[in-house]
Image: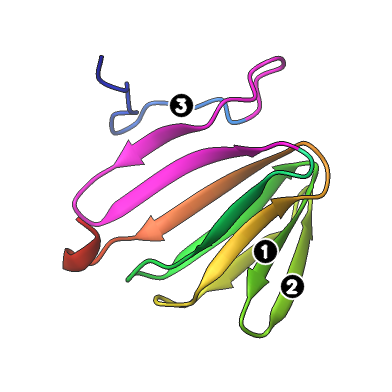
Amino acid sequence: MATKRATSGEVIDLVTPGDASTRALVKTDELEVLRLAVPRAKTIDTHQVSGDLTVQCLEGRAALTTPDGDIELGAGQLVYLAGQTPHGVRGIEDTRLLVTICLRPKDR
């Protein structure tokens, strides 16, 4: 079953009570947006993408691991990472993140 993604002009609820799922929200040739659920104490291993990205904390608290050290994000905070920056994620609390990636040909 294909994942439903938003169409141009469609409103997306980012924080729906009781829905703590990870899901792709938008994907075009140049842009990918996803809501990432990270439970407390869960770790997502270090990885990287070619394009620039932002990570916005919608709820909870998470730590992004980078070569320059950990970056802690709380609700309402956003961080920008340049393309090719290695990063991982650890849930400090049950957390929902909004991840926006500018895609480059290698990521497609």
The reply, left or right, for residue 16 in relation to residue 9 is: right
How many numbered badges does the structure rendering display? 3
**SS for dot 1:** strand
Q: Secondary structure at mark 2?
A: strand
- Amino acid on which the number 2 mark rests in the picture: Asp
Q: CA distance from mark 1 to mark 3?
A: 28 Å
Residue at 29% x, 42% y is 27
**Taking 49 as reference, is 90 left or right?**
right
Which labelled disc corresponds to residue 18? none
Mark 2 or mark 3: which comes first in sequence? Answer: 3
Q: Earlier in the sequence, mark 2 or mark 1?
A: 1
Judge whether 97 appears above or below 49 on screen. above
Residue tagged by mark 2?
Answer: 70
Query: Which quarter of the figure is the N terminus placed in?
Result: top left
Q: Which residue is mark 1?
A: 64
Query: Between marks 2 and 3, how big is the CA–CA gap?
Result: 33 Å
The image quadrant of residue 2 is top left
Amino acid type shown at disc 1: Leu
- Mark 1 or 3: in front is 1
What residue lies at 50% left-to-right and 74% top-to-bottom? 86
User: Is 38 included in the stretch rendered in magenta?
Assistant: yes
Q: Quadrant of residue 64?
A: bottom right
> Which is nearer the N-term, disc 1 or disc 3?
3
User: Camera-side residue: 44 or 59?
Assistant: 44
- Quadrant occupied by the C terminus: bottom left
Residue under circle 3? 11
Q: Is residue 40 magenta?
A: no
Residue range (magenta): 15-39
